Amino acid sequence: MKILILGGDGYLGWPTAMSFAKKNHEVLVVDNYLRRNIARETRSEALIPMPNLHDRVGIFYQATGKTIGVEIADCKDYMLLSRIVRDFKPDTVVHYAEQPSGPYSMTDYQSARLTFDNNLTVTFNTIWAILEEVPDCHLVKLGTMGEYGTPNIDIEEGWLEIEHKGRKDRFLYPRQAGSLYHTTKVLDTDLLWFYVRTYGMRVTDLMQGPVYGLSTAESDLDERLLPNFHYDDIFGTVVNRFLVQAIAGVPLTVYGKGGQTRGYLNLKDTLQCVELATLNPVEKGDLRILNQLTEQFTVNELAEKTQRVGNQLGLNVQVKSVKNPRKEAEDHYYNTQHSGLLDLGLKPHYLTDEVMEEMLKTVMKYKDRIDEKMILPRVKWS
């Protein structure tokens, strides 16, 4: 297949590109280094040194003999994106090209404006580039479980059957996002549903939980191929933050009561999920929503697991509750339906003690690069 990956330099985008290319798909990645630039501006650089995209592609070719095309371009430029789509003629567009941080989106007006403009404009441009240039193309869009919030009922897989005054209908599951970033993802879903209904697009929207992990089968070939692993309070997901804190000797920062529950998955499973969605495209006029997670944890459970495994490695891991900088429920009901990807063939990697130990040992190699000033929360919701 011909697969166009928007946001192909990112934590998820780069491993996805390598995975597809290794399996003999024709892959083109597009990125404008927005996340790298924001990380520098906010002193939130990745733990592991990252070659630029052209160098990464060269290293990957040396390791595998497989090629990946690169376009350094801003997807907010519609004419440029349209030209790329017209020239490449993808069978699938995988859309990661968004500002991905809830904390960053809540920093100030400028960060909120950038998040809003980038995320909505890129999604809108992607929709129109597909409609005008490759109308049969399948769009695989990365959403987020954060769109749903923490309702006091089970979270269904994207849709909800409603009976009201004796009549029934099917609607998008109600969304109540907890940050501006997550709100832009809600608006993405609404945009996609409108264009699916109106123009018959084929779209898969993947509601992904927080991702953890460092390595994939491809990055194991050369450490220079590792993803841009962030551990700071702005771009680092909670498991990745805890791994680095354990190695650095910094108490694990549990926000508030620590009862916040979410659905998590290994980076390797993100690659599986995107591949399964890509190889099983939906029909025209269908918006398929898949909840992308493998298991649920509270923050306290993750801290306990990190502490236990870290102590087995002699790290003397401590846990500390800090004032929650976010506006969120700290003790709530959370039960998510997520059978769709399992039905397509997902083989989950679970967060076992062995997996936690392997990740800690990998982080330990880069201990000297840890900047403790990036760990404590620097952004408050109010």
Image (spheres, rainbow, N blue to C red):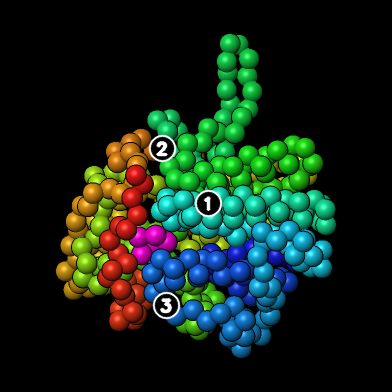
Q: Which mark is residue 6?
A: none
Q: Amino acid at mark 3?
A: Ile
Whether residue 307 appears in magenta in the rendering, the answer is no
Left or right: residue 316 compared with residue 86: left
Q: Quadrant of the N terminus?
A: bottom right
Q: Nearer the viewer, residue 335 or 378?
A: 378
The dominant secondary structure in magenta is loop
Q: Residue at x 51, y 60 (%)?
A: 269
Determine contact: label 1, label 3, CB under 8 Å. Answer: no
Q: Which residues are magenta?
A: 232-236
Q: Amino acid at mark 2?
A: Thr
Classed neighbour count for the residue bearing mark 3: other residues with Cα under 10 Å, few (<14), some (14–19), many (≥20): many
Residue 382 percent across, percent down from the top left: 34, 44
Q: Which residue is mark 1?
A: 113
Q: Earlier in the sequence, mark 3 or mark 2?
A: 3
Q: Residue at x 30, y 79 (%)?
A: 367
Residue 36 percent across, percent down from the top left: 50, 70
Q: Which mark is residue 48?
A: 3
Left or right: residue 278 compared with residue 238: right
Q: Earlier in the sequence, mark 1 or mark 2?
A: 1
